[in-house]
Image: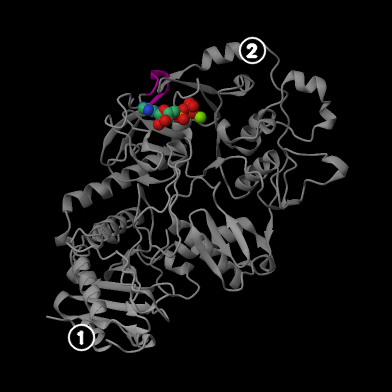
Amino acid sequence: PLSGLQKHLQGLEGRQYPSYKDLCGGGWDIEQRSMTVFFDRVQGDAYAPPSWIRARVPMSAAKFPPAYVTESRIRNTALCDFVTRVLSDRLRGGGGTDWTQVVQGGGWSGSKGGDLQIDTPGQYVLERSSVVAKAEFIEARVTLALPARGRSIEGYRAADIVGGLCEAVEGSLFYKSLDAAALQSHIEAVEDQDALRKQLSGLGLVAFVGNGAILPRKSGVDDRPMTTKDSPNLVTFESPTSMEVTVSLPHAGDVTGMGIQKGVTLIVGGGFHGKSTLLQGTGLHFSKKPGNVAEAGMKFDSEAEALQLGIYNKVPGDGREHVVCDPQAVKIRAEDGRSVKSADISPFINNLPFGKQTQQFSTGDASGSTSQAANIVEALEVGCTTLLVDEDTCATNFMIRDEKMKALVAPDKEPITAFVCKVRSLLEEQGVSTVLVVGGSGDFFSVADSVIMMDEYVANDVTKRAREIGQKSAPPTQAAFGKVARRRLQPSGLAADGKVAARSLRCIQYGDTEVELSCVEQLVEISQARAIGDALQLLGDGHLVKGGRPLTSVMSDLEQQIHAEGKPVGEQGLDSLSRFREPCPFYA
Ligand code: ADP
Ligand code: MG
């Protein structure tokens, strides 16, 4: 039997598009299925961005164990991530019909719209707004391009699609309809990774790579784990004995792997021996991965590497479940052409030609080395405690300077203090560790605490030998680090005229400005870019930056707003980033 909502939609058949606005307001009870459907935003015409719909099931009917819903934030996150995946599969054809297909054609008067979309996760288990579970209810948020023929509502088709949505919700938002064992192992795997990451600091580590981990990915466009079908040479990770650490996890029990100590760690080895794969790897680019909430022209890109993605929890079966790093680890790279605003890059760069100052350095087009310096000081400014650096994406003149060059170009003519001269003071004065991939220069040997050599994808501890070689020549002169400046965020710098959109994971359109995210390699889903864009918008509007406040305070206020301490689990949330206070379907 049709629900009241479906009958209402059928009644709209042939009416003018704006009649869809009637759907807003209170929720629509779906009598047969113990759920309520809300229309939070209804588009003005068939070409506008799709409408936002929520389907809510009371917990008394959904019956998820309270241990998953309200006991800890990490379990709640894992639950919602799991339910998002199941619902996404069902909408995508797992229930028979693929409701995400776009109907097009027939010119202006032909059928338009009709596709349902839900945020579709990849390998990472992130806090998301696509599904929200609280003590009282669980709800899913999707978008639907409400169907029309020209300006005329296709009410019967809309009723069909909404029926499909309700069926998919029935198959995913009720505990009894899910694979309970799979849900449990999803939650346990995530809880283990979280526990592992939390143990790092106490063990004096910045990263851990479990034995048996599969680090390489399937291909350049697929970040699922490599299998022996993809490459017969697949080598699973084994720690050198000297670096082995055993940790105890709540569900998996004792797990052994390679512990990377706080300090300066080098990853060396011949080209193509797996260094970057261990640290960060070559860029993996997905173009238009099907299934992401598709606003027109949106792209999904990802870079998916081992350590630098150790800040995230992965799905069971990813191969990197026991690869974690310091949650405050930041991947640093050169990013020439980037814009820099009032950054103090003087720890690395001084005495520019014609007396240009570097304590408040601004440029619309930074060089490789200045961009890398800016990326480091900005990371430090907001509390980064580990730098992850790969020579593949570094500016060479920022990293080292050899004797021959010093002989030719006098030091007082060189504005750059090479990273190799600061890496120790960064550790000793600022408490910041560095994990660095190098294949081309031994200059770092004498400043390293440990050296890992990748040899045919096998990790070896070569610290002793590297130290001996390092001692044969004069060590690079070490310089004091200098101070990390704290900038203030001015409200006037945050005026986007109401227009903010994440066009892809790589670009946020912010008013007339394009905020480039391509080189922020640790972002993995477009929904993160959406959350960042809306967070900027919220700051621009609000009281958080009144009078110009330090960036660090603004960041912790935002964090506080999202994860309001003291509020029950499930009550905090990403929804607070929405300026319109509407439950946004796609934040991560
Ligand atoms: P490097 O940075 O040392 O030059 P990469 O990390 O880029 O090397 O790895 C080179 C290639 O080897 C990549 O195509 C990667 O997928 C593959 N690879 C890396 N680690 C492994 C492994 N453990 N098993 C199989 N193939 C691997
Ligand atoms: Mg490399």
Closer to the camera, 262 or 140?
A: 140
Which residue in the rendered view is the most extreme toward the front?
106
Residue 228, by quadrant, is top left
Q: CA distance from mark 2 to mark 1?
A: 82 Å
Residue indicated by mark 1: 7
Q: Amino acid at mark 2?
A: Gln
Relative to 20, does residue 566 appear above or below in the rendering? above
The numbered mark, 2 or 1, whose residue comes first in the sequence reads 1
Does 172 sit left or right of 107 as displayed? left
Closer to the camera, 108 or 391?
A: 108
Bounds of the magenta segment? 239-245
Q: Which mark is residue 471?
A: 2
Write the residue at 70% across / 36% down.
Answer: 481
Q: Position of residue 161 (x, y in %)?
A: 24, 73
Does 4 sit left or right of 379 as displayed? left
Write the residue at 17% across / 53% down.
Answer: 180
Residue 243 lies in magenta, yes or no?
yes
Secondary element at tag 1: helix
Q: Position of residue 535 (x, y in %)?
A: 53, 64
